Structure formats: structure tokens, C-alpha cells
Image: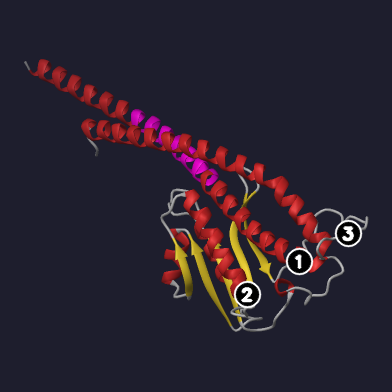
Amino acid sequence: MATLKDIKLRISSVKNTQQITKAMKMVAASKMKKAEDRIKAARPYTDKLTQVVTNLASGLEAGAHPLLTKRKGGKALIVLFTSDRGLCGGLNSNLCKSLNRFIKSVLEEVEHVELVTLGRKGRDYFRKTNEKMLQSFADRKENEYTEELGKLMSQLIAGYEEGEFNRLYLAYNHFRNVITQEVTFQQVLPVQPPKGGGPAVEAEFVLEPDKAAILNEILPQYVENQAFTALLDGFACEHASRMTSMDAATKNAGELIKSLRLQYNRARQAAITTELTEIISGAESL
């Protein structure tokens, strides 16, 4: 049975842990708010760009532009967005396990799949499964990931145009709200005219210099923006999940402290009762 000293040390240890989890919750809440603000700030541009692509691509044939061209078989690339750090519940493991199943479904239509990972958790997970990784980026600051992603997407767009692979997918957690994060797999190449991107504008526009030149500028921006949105979603999901996990840990620590205090008081009462019994027994023997 634990002694009073052991229980007291345990209470002190749990209190220290509770202070840490509470601080981590506050930090995660602050970071999540900033990430959510960035998503809201980027949304008007994303919505308008999506509408422009919808209007331009409507009525076009699949081969009207290299980024619209569909090719069968070959290789598919998947860009995976995970976090570098843990303590965010099952956010990363759920995404990676779902991606395993998604890869199997993609392999029914292509010959093989390669991964590009952003985040240490995704890299470490798929190293263990021996999935082929084209590139991996880990242990960087958020602004550094943004810069790396811009360079990466430019390379991948060029690679698709040159026929190095036939499909490009994004795998990430989509931020709905603080409680809800959805595992999402999105095909970005070949570009598919987005559904629900706003009603196509019926008015006729004069496109200068011509539609092909505009598509050359707009479609790469659209693909890069989809990846950037996925990155922002990943940041927000990480911080929201960590905030929720640390809040639960803080509450659990509080419940454990209550239980330990009750155990401590009972043990102390039992010790006092034992001492009184010994004193009375000693007095009676005299």
C-alpha cells in the first residue's frame, strides 16, 4: 500500500503535469486562432480563383491544356500533409491509416504510387511501411513550409506537363471547426473543373490575349492555391487537435488529483486511527 509520502509526491507530480498541459492548451489555442484567421483571409481569393477556373474551363475539352490532359496508367504522386510534433490525438495516425487504404484504391487505376511528405509524423509512418518517397520535408517552421511548398508545387506542375507522372493528389486534414477535422484526399492534377465553385457567369467576356494564355497563368496558380489551402488546413487542424487533447489531459489531471487527495486523506485518517488505537491499548495495559 502506498505511503502518505508516496501519495503526496504523486499529487505534486500530477500538479506539475497539469500546469504543463494547461500551458500547452493555451499556446495551441493562440496558434489555432492565428491559423484560422489565415484560412479566413485566404478564402475570398480561393473562392474567386475557383470561380474563374470554373468559368474558363466550362466547355473546354480535357486536352485543351496540358494541366487538363488526362492520361491512363503510369505513376501517381500523393503529397501528404502531417504535423512534426505529436500530442494532438489521433490526427496524424488516422490520416496515415486512411491514406494506406486510399493508396490501394489508386493502385487499381495506376501502376505505382510515390509519396511526398510534409511533416515528420507522415514521413516516419511511411518509412516503416516501405512506401516509396520521392521527397520529404520535416522539422521546419510554418513559414518555411510555405516557401518549400511553393517551390515543390512548381516542380510538380512542370513534372506533370513533361509526363513524369499522370496524377497528383493531396492528402490532408480539412479544418471544419475546433472539434471537427476531416481526412481529405483531393485530386489536383489533372485539373478537374471544380464542382460547387459558384455559378458560371453567363455574360460573354473578351479574353485578352486569349483563353489559352490565361489558362497558362491561372491553372498553375489554381493548383498551387489548392496545396497552400491544404497546408493552412493542416496547421489549423494540428493546433485545434492539440488544444482539445491538452484540455482533456488537464481535466483528467484534475480528476486524478481529486482522487489522490481522497486517497491521501483516507490513508492519513487510517494512520491517525491506528496511532490512537495503539495509545489507548498502551494506556490500558498500564
Q: Does residue 98 appear in the picture of this structure? A: no
Q: If you read the primary sequence from the N terminus, does the residue marked by circle 3 or circle 2 appear first?
A: 2
Calculate the distance from the C-alpha at mark 3 to the C-alpha at mark 2.
30 Å
Q: Does residue 262 appear in the picture of this structure? A: yes
> Residue 185, position in %: x, y?
64, 64
Within 10 angstroms of label 3, few (less than 14), some, or many (20 or more) residues?
few
Q: Nearer the viewer, mark 3 or mark 2?
A: 3
Horizontally, is 179 left or right of 285 in the view?
Answer: right
Residue type beneath disc 2: Tyr
For label 2, the residue is 160
For label 3, the residue is 206
- What SS does tag 1 mark? helix
Residue at the location (72% across, 45% down)? 44
Residue at the location (63% across, 60% down)? 224
Q: Residue furthest right?
A: 203
Q: If you read the primary sequence from the N terminus, does the residue marked by circle 2 or circle 1 appear first?
A: 2
> Residue 100, position in %: x, y?
55, 70
Q: If you read the primary sequence from the N terminus, does the residue marked by circle 3 or circle 1 appear first?
A: 3
Of residues 58 and 22, the one drawn nearer to the viewer in this rendering: 58
Q: Which mark is residue 213?
A: 1
Q: Which mark is residue 121?
A: none
**Magenta highlight range:** 240-262
The answer to whether residue 222 is above or below residue 35 is below
Horizontally, is 197 left or right of 109 in the view?
Answer: right
